[in-house]
Amino acid sequence: MSNKEEQLNALNDIKKMMDRSSRFISLSGLSGVFAGFTALVGAYLAHLEIANSVNGTYEYGFTEDDLEANLIKIGLGVLVVALIGGFLLTLRQTRIKKLPFWDRTSKNLLINLAIPLFAGGLFIIGLLLAHPGTYGLIAPSCLLFYGLALINASKYTYTDIRFLGFCEVVLGLVAMFNIGYGLYFWAFGFGVLHIFYGLLMYFKYERTK
Amino acid sequence: MKNPIGALNKIFDSRIRLGVMSILIVNDSISFNELKQMLELTDGNLASHLNTLEQAEYLKVQKSFIGKKTNTTYILTDLGRQAFKTHLDALEKMIKSL
């Protein structure tokens, strides 16, 4: 332990152990890309659904409640598909890196992501159930709570997630003042931004290694 | 001139002990098994290094039970935190001066 290289190696080791023990570094950028595409498909389906209901393509008896139910189905479908895809792609990444999938870092990441998301989820359910006519607030609230969740979780994974969180929060706030265009903001936040950041992380952390 | 090598802590000469300290500095408490998994060591090897650190009073051992199994967790003492910081500063100085 006397020359410069030795000491630099020691410092690198320290940094690596600090990161590996406190941050989940196997989050796959491709899962972001996948989630983004799923969200775009979902947004397109929702768009068709709304257009059909407005144009009266559906038979007599199709109410606003039916539309709401269909949109919720699409939303949940997107969530499930994106989660499964993200889970599998991240699992694959842990195999490549030979790191454990379920350890304290992934637990920390999930818990800290879940707290604002859970609060946001209840808030949105509250909007749907107790405040009829506030549909316009759903997309901005989704973006806002999701952004805050990402910022909160970013301490436990790549810091890039933090900037994605900021983008989602800003987008949510802008959407708040543009009620009626919620679906477009939603598609941009959950679709385009996910794909963009997913690719960014993929090229930054995965392809070079 | 003060020799910067003198400020380097002998206890941290071992990469394994340095690794343990690096992990503990960013985690409030950590179990023996988690340390073992992260450092990819055998039980005996890790235990002897942890013992050295404990003797130096750089870390505290807490034993508890999860069901019937013992769960040993480690936390850094203030002395350990200080020693690690001093060591890092010394490393930094050495690299700059070379």
Image: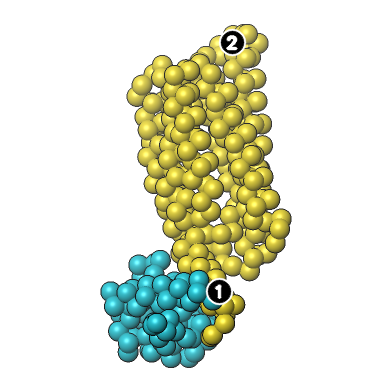
Q: Quadrant of residue A184?
A: top right
Is residue A100 in view from this perspective? yes
Label 2 crowding class (10 Å Cα cut-off): few <14, some 14-19, many 20+? few
Q: Farthest residue toward the left? A: B78
- The residue at the point 64 percent across, 46 percent down is A200
What is the spatial separation of the Cα atoms under label 1 and label 2, in whole angstroms?
Answer: 65 Å
Quadrant where the image shows the N terminus of chain B: bottom left
Name the foreground residue: A44 vs A74: A44
Residue kind at label 2, given as amino acid type: Val
Q: Which mark is residue A8?
A: 1
Name the foreground residue: B13 vs A59: B13
Residue A45, above or below B31: above
- The residue at the point 43 percent across, 30 percent down is A141
Of callouts 1 and 2, the N-terminal one: 1
Counting from the top left corner in percent of width and height, residue A185 is at 55, 26
Chain under callout 1:
A
Counting from the top left corner in percent of width and height, residue A145 is at 43, 37
Chain under callout 2:
A
- The residue at the point 29 percent across, 78 percent down is B79
Determine the secondary structure under disc 1.
helix
Q: Are marks 1 and 2 in contact (CB under 8 Å)?
A: no
Name the foreground residue: A14 vs A63: A14
Is residue A85 in view from this perspective? no
Mark 1 vs mark 2: same chain? yes
Name the foreground residue: A57 vs B27: B27
Q: Colour of chain B?
A: cyan
Determine the secondary structure under disc 2.
helix
Q: Which chain is yellow?
A: A
Residue A52, above or below A107: above
Q: Which mark is residue A54?
A: 2
